Image (cartoon, rainbow, N blue to C red):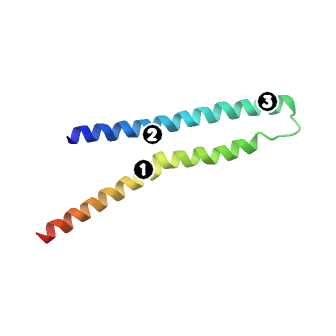
């Protein structure tokens, strides 16, 4: 049972990382295209940086949610589980 749970958790983590990598790839590809269109059509008016920065905030938030927040939440959950188990053992 525990092996199955660990497998499911690992599978969920891999899907989460894969989703971020896909998001990052599309971000780079689309913004490179926008930069090329902007620089070819009107190099005097630089506008591609606006979607670059706006979407970049979303990519950064996605990365934080995958790599930082998840680790923090996981450690918090483990800490709470230990606290509850210790409290439960003290009552018996």
Position of residue 22 in the picture relative to residue 16 (left or right):
right
Residue 68, placed above or below residue 36: below
Secondary structure beneath dot 2 equals helix
What element does badge 1 sit on?
A: helix
Which quadrant is home to the C terminus?
Answer: bottom left
**Marks 3/1: CA–CA distance:** 37 Å
Q: Residue at x 39, y 40 (%)?
A: 13
Mark 3 closeness class: few <14, some 14–19, many ≥20 residues within 10 Å: few
Q: Earlier in the sequence, mark 2 or mark 1?
A: 2
C-beta proximity under 8 Å, tags 2 and 1 = yes
| Residue neighbourhood size for the residue with mark 2, other residues' Cα within 10 Å, grouped as few (<14), some (14–19), many (≥20) | some
* Figure check: 71 above or below 49: below
Q: Which of marks 3 and 1 is nearer the N terminus?
A: 3
The residue where tag 2 is placed is 16
Q: Where is residue 30 in the image (x, y as percent from the top left)?
A: 67, 32
Instruction: Name the residue rendered at 40%, 51% in the picture.
Output: 71
Q: Which of marks 3 and 2 is nearer the N terminus?
A: 2
**Residue 84 falls left or right of residue 24:** left
**Residue 66 horizontal/vertical position (percent):** 47, 45
Q: How far apart are marks 2 and 1 (CA)?
A: 10 Å
In screen coordinates, is 15 left or right of 55? left
- Circle number at residue 70: 1
The picture quadrant where one finds residue 25 is: top right
Location of residue 89 by image quarter: bottom left
Secondary structure under tag 3 reads: helix
Which mark, by number, is residue 37?
Answer: 3
Q: Position of residue 61 (x, y in %)?
A: 56, 49
Q: Where, quadrant-wise, is the N terminus in this rendering?
A: top left
Residue 91 picture quarter:
bottom left
């Amino acid at each position: 049972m525990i092996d199955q749970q660990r497998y499911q958790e690992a599978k969920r983590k891999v899907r989460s990382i894969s989703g971020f990598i896909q998001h990052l790839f599309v971000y780079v590809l689309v913004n490179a295209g926008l930069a090329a269109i902007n620089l070819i059509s009107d190099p005097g008016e630089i506008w591609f940086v606006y979607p670059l920065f706006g979407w970049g905030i979303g990519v950064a938030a996605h990365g934080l949610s995958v790599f930082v927040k998840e680790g923090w939440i996981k450690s918090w959950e483990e800490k709470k589980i230990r606290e509850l188990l210790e409290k439960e053992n003290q009552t018996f």
